[in-house]
Image (tube, rainbow, N blue to C red):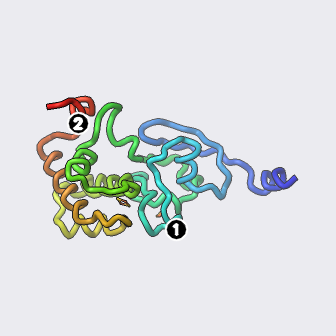
Amino acid sequence: MSNSLSEDRYPYIKVKLSVNGRDYEVSVRPYERLIDVLRYKLGLTSVKEGCGRGECGACVVIMDGKLVPSCLVLAVRANNKKILTLEGLAPEGKLHAIQKAFLDVMSVQCGYCLPGVILATKWLLDKNPSPTDQEIKEVLGGQLCRCGSYLRFVKAVKLAVKYLKEGKVYFDIQELMSPP
Ligand code: FES
Ligand code: FES
């Protein structure tokens, strides 16, 4: 009874999404959030929930070139949008230069904030390939890290800038794991 009431009142709506270069059509309720569609309907669990109210940055994705907190976006508002999550940053078997740089400087402890921090870095470097320390801090200031890894984040972003300037965009995971 209560289900059919909810169905009448909030019928499913079909939404088309292009996520990490792949097209999807999903049925969503008008009140469903983008974060839930990405995590629970598409299985993209790199998108983390922290505060659930647009303050921590754990859930950010790049949507049509904008860095957005997916906890604040209704899935219906993402209709026909292009979305990038961490899963789409590098081809299968590769790490993106930003991921490699964050690993190199051991810039995290628990890592919960990292998908959002890496996507925020990607967004920054797409717009500004040579950011100053201050510009890095301004963008990553929106990404909360309860382990307090902030200073190492700046180092990691600068290393990513170096890799990208050297033309090293992707790194082969197998090669990184092989003993020297
Ligand atoms: S969970 Fe979306 S900003 Fe914190
Ligand atoms: S490394 Fe733990 S929240 Fe950032």
Q: What residue appears at the point 18 percent right and 66 percent down from the top-left corner?
A: 133
Point out the quarter of the image occupied by ligand 2: bottom left
* Closest to the observer, 98 or 81: 98
Kind of residue at badge 2: Phe
Q: Which residue is mark 1?
A: 53
Question: Disc 1 versus disc 2: distance between alpha carbons?
Answer: 35 Å
The secondary element bearing badge 1 is classed as loop
User: Which element type, helix, strand or loop, lies under badge 2?
Assistant: strand
Q: Image quarter for residue 135?
A: bottom left
Which image quadrant for residue 90?
Answer: top left
Give the label on residue 171, or none.
2
62 sits left or right of 166 in the view: right
Residue 86, percent across and down? 38, 46
**Residue 96 percent location from the top left of the image:** 27, 42
Q: Earlier in the sequence, mark 1 or mark 2?
A: 1
Give me the residue at 16% from left, 65% from top. 132
Q: Is residue 74 left or right of residue 88?
A: right
Figure check: 29 above or below 72: above
Q: Quadrant of residue 168?
A: top left
Describe residue 38's horizontal placement relative to residue 138 as left or right: right
